[in-house]
Each structure stands twice: as structure tokens, then as C-alpha cells.
Image (cartoon, rainbow, N blue to C red):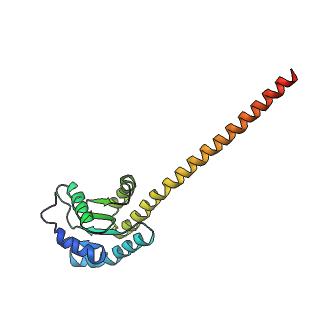
Amino acid sequence: MIPADVDLDDLNRQLGEDAVAFGAFVPEGKAADLEPGLLDAVAHARDTDFGTLGLVILEHTPPQTADMRDVAQELLMSTDLDTVIVRAPHSGAVVSDVHSRAGLEVAQYPFLGNPDVVGAAHRFVDDVNAAAASWPSVIALILLGVAGTSAFTVVGARRQRRDSQKSSLQS
């Protein structure tokens, strides 16, 4: 459910302007301090093939923290962003059309626990990128292991057959 004090239309408008949005109760001074760093985090996401990122900062954590996921999902569906993060003082939510839920959750916990919202946003992008990059590496290592094992098995079977044939000829 979308909390009554969250104006989705205003957040959508702000995300459409520069991919960073502040809830109605975020003090202007705080927004002015955070915005340059958050814009840099959005650019960092784009430059590292993370995809398009939208960051929403709310001043209050809703009574039902699950509502932040609803806010994030609504914003994701109504924008052309790939990933939306909604951050409040005591919780947050992340939804994405391009990143796995597992990769997001691994990166989400350090992000939500870090009071430095700007630094946490940069780290979040890097952590999700690292999680996404590790699966191809794991698969490649598994395939190399299977190929190596197969090769040793074939060589061993040929050697055993050759040794068996030599024994038969000598008898």
C-alpha cells in the first residue's frame, strides 16, 4: 500500500527530471546536500553498465516498512528506469527489472545499514555489479572443471585399454 504522505506523482516527476527524488518532508537543506552525490551515483550506475537507477529519499519511515517496496515498485512501473531504490531513515526497498533479487538483496543490507546515503549508493551499484559479474565466472570455472575431468577420464581410459591390450598380447 502506498502511504498517504507519499506523493507518487511528485516523485515520478522528480525521477523524470534527473533520476533523483525527495519526499515532501525532506528539508530543502538536506536535499541540496544530498542531491549532487546522488546524481553522481546515478551517473556511476549508468557508466558501469548497472543500468538506469532512480534514487528516492523519504524523510520518514512508513509504519509498515513493506509499503516502501510498494512505492518502489510503482515508481519502477511508471518510469523507464531499470532499478529504483527508496530509502528512509530506518529502512528502504530496492526493485529492478534487470538485476536478480538475490544480487539486490546481497547489496541491499550494507546499503540500508550505512548512514552515508551517497557513499552507500555508490557501494550498492558496485556490489550489485560484482554479484552479477561473479556468476559468469563461476559458470566458466565449472565448465573448465568438467572439461578437465573429462579429458583426464578419456586419457586414463585409453591408457588402461592400451595396457590391457599389451597384457593380452604378452600372455
Residue 46 shows in this picture: yes
- Please tell me in which quadrant of the rendered image residue 120 appears: bottom left
Q: Is residue 2 above or below residue 25?
A: above
Extreme residue in the left direction: 4
**165 or 32, which lies in front?**
165
Direction from residue 101 to residue 56 in the image, left or right: left
Q: The C terminus is located in which quarter?
A: top right
Direction from residue 40 to residue 90 in the image, left or right: left
Residue 163 position, x and y percent, is 80, 30
Extreme residue in the right direction: 170
- Please tell me in which quadrant of the rendered image residue 80 appears: bottom left
Direction from residue 138 to residue 164 in the image, left or right: right
Name which residue lies at 26% across and 73% down. 15
Residue 88 shows in this picture: no
Name which residue lies at 24% across and 75% down. 14
Residue 88 position, x and y percent, is 25, 63
- Please tell me in which quadrant of the rendered image residue 68 appears: bottom left
Residue 19 position, x and y percent, is 30, 73
Name which residue lies at 38% across and 52% down. 102
Name which residue lies at 18% across and 73% down. 10
Q: Is residue 73 above or below residue 138?
A: below
**133 or 26, which lies in front?**
133
Residue 101 position, x and y percent, is 35, 53
Please count the marks in the image: 0
Q: The N terminus is located in which quarter?
A: bottom left
